Image (cartoon, rainbow, N blue to C red):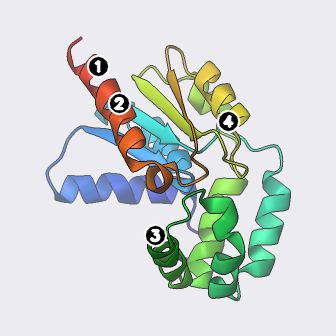
């Protein structure tokens, strides 16, 4: 969609859930998905059973510079994927790395530019501070793209948020340490479901 924003992404996610007759959801998003999760909460807080925001932020201090570099590199998505894989992942498994490169290479450059604008130019600090939904913030301790300090800031903005830093994981913590990532989510959901 031309000129799509993070709010449009949030509306699309809720529309998909509507089409599946799902009224409430545990909303989990990583990186851009975390930014969209905050926007989903802002659009429909009563529909969020919980939020899980991974390797993301409320506002990135270098967002404009990262956005500018992303736009400049977006005409060659394969080249961008190959250049960024080391920053995206600590996992050295060539199969997993190859899958990430292939997936990223297939992103339409215009869609990538819309996503880059939605994520890197976001400032959702006020929205984060207004969240009253149970929230888990996850970050890989080796994430140089959205460093742990940004996850700590986000967790501090959200009243009562839990923070889980995953050792040995980078920006794609779910692929670097899937067992630890899933265990953090399972433990969080078990805690909030027993309330």
Residue 168 horizontal/vertical position (percent): 58, 44
How packed is label 3: few (under 14 Cα within 10 Å), some, or many (20 or more)? some
Q: Is residue 117 visible?
A: no
Which residue was labeled with disc 4? 148
Image check: 117 left or right of 44?
A: right
Indicate the secondary structure of the residue bearing disc 3.
helix
Q: Note whether 80 is above or below 195 in the view shown.
A: below
Q: Is residue 87 visible?
A: yes
How packed is label 4: few (under 14 Cα within 10 Å), some, or many (20 or more)? many
> Earlier along the polypeptide chain: callout 4 or callout 2?
2
Of residues 56 and 5, which is closer to you in this image?
Answer: 56
The total of numbered circles placed on residues is 4
> Earlier along the polypeptide chain: callout 3 or callout 1?
3
Which residue was labeled with disc 1? 192
Image check: 40 left or right of 23?
A: right
> Earlier along the polypeptide chain: callout 3 or callout 4?
3
How packed is label 1: few (under 14 Cα within 10 Å), some, or many (20 or more)? few
Q: Residue furthest front?
A: 93
Of circles 3 and 1, the one toward us is: 3
CB within 8 Å, label 1 to label 2: yes
Of circles 4 and 2, the one toward us is: 4
Which residue was labeled with disc 3? 96
């Amino acid at each position: 969609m031309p000129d799509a924003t993070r709010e449009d992404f949030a509306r699309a996610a809720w529309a998909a859930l509507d089409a599946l007759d799902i009224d409430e959801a545990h909303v989990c998003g990583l990186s851009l998905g975390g930014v969209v999760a905050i926007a989903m909460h802002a659009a429909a807080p009563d529909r969020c059973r919980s939020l899980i925001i991974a390797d993301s932020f409320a506002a990135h201090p270098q967002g404009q510079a990262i956005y500018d570099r992303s736009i400049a590199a977006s005409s060659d998505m394969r080249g961008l994927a190959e250049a960024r894989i080391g920053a995206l992942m600590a996992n050295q498994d060539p199969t997993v790395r190859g899958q990430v490169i292939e997936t990223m290479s297939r992103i339409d450059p215009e869609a990538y530019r819309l996503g880059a604008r939605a994520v890197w130019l976001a400032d959702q600090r006020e929205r984060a501070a207004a969240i009253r939904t149970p929230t888990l913030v996850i970050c890989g301790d080796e994430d140089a793209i959205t460093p742990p300090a940004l996850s700590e800031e986000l967790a501090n903005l959200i009243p009562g948020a839990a923070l889980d830093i995953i050792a040995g994981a980078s920006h794609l913590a779910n692929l670097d340490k899937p067992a630890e990532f899933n265990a953090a989510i399972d433990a969080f959901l078990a805690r909030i479901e027993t309330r």
